[in-house]
Amino acid sequence: MRITIDTNRCIGSGQCALTAPSVFTQDDDGFSALLPGREDGGGDPLVREAVRACPVQAIEVAED
């Protein structure tokens, strides 16, 4: 799987970081970011829930 974040769409609600903290974080400005090395989700089963939790649908998961 490959995770991408549309940084132009993200509003910094933090739902992704709250839902899957081993994959997502927030940058210094409060916007969503992937933790280094977690672009593939790191096998975290909560990644898809984090995608659903995003209020502006800024996160996309593509299967490899």
Image: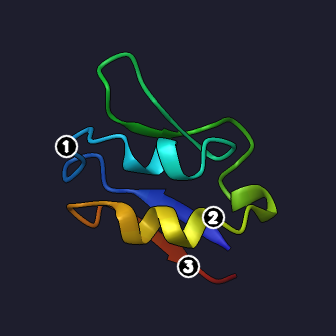
Badge 2 local density, few (<14 within 10 Å), some, or many (20+)? some
Nearer mark to the viewer, of 1 and 2: 2
Number of the label disc, if any, that sits on residue 62 = 3
Badge 3 local density, few (<14 within 10 Å), some, or many (20+)? few
> Label 2's element?
loop
**Residue at (64, 83) in percent of width and height:** 63
User: Identity of the amino acid at label 2?
Assistant: Leu
Q: 3 left or right of 59?
A: right
> Label 3's element?
strand
**Residue at (29, 20) in percent of width and height:** 29
Q: 9 left or right of 4?
A: left
Residue tagged by mark 2?
46
Task: Give the image location of residue 12, x and y in percent.
Answer: 26, 38
Dot placed on the residue nearer the N-terminal end, 1 or 2: 1
User: Identity of the amino acid at label 3?
Assistant: Ala
> Label 1's element?
loop
How many numbered marks have been drawn onto this rendered protein structure? 3
Q: Is residue 20 above or below residue 25?
A: below
Q: How is the image coloured?
A: rainbow
Task: Give the image location of residue 27, x and y in percent.
Answer: 42, 24
**Residue at (38, 48) in percent of width and height:** 15
Task: Give the image location of residue 30, x and y in percent.
Answer: 32, 26
Res 37 → quadrant: top right
Q: Is residue 44 above or below residue 24?
A: below
Q: 42 left or right of 56?
A: right
Residue tagged by mark 1?
11
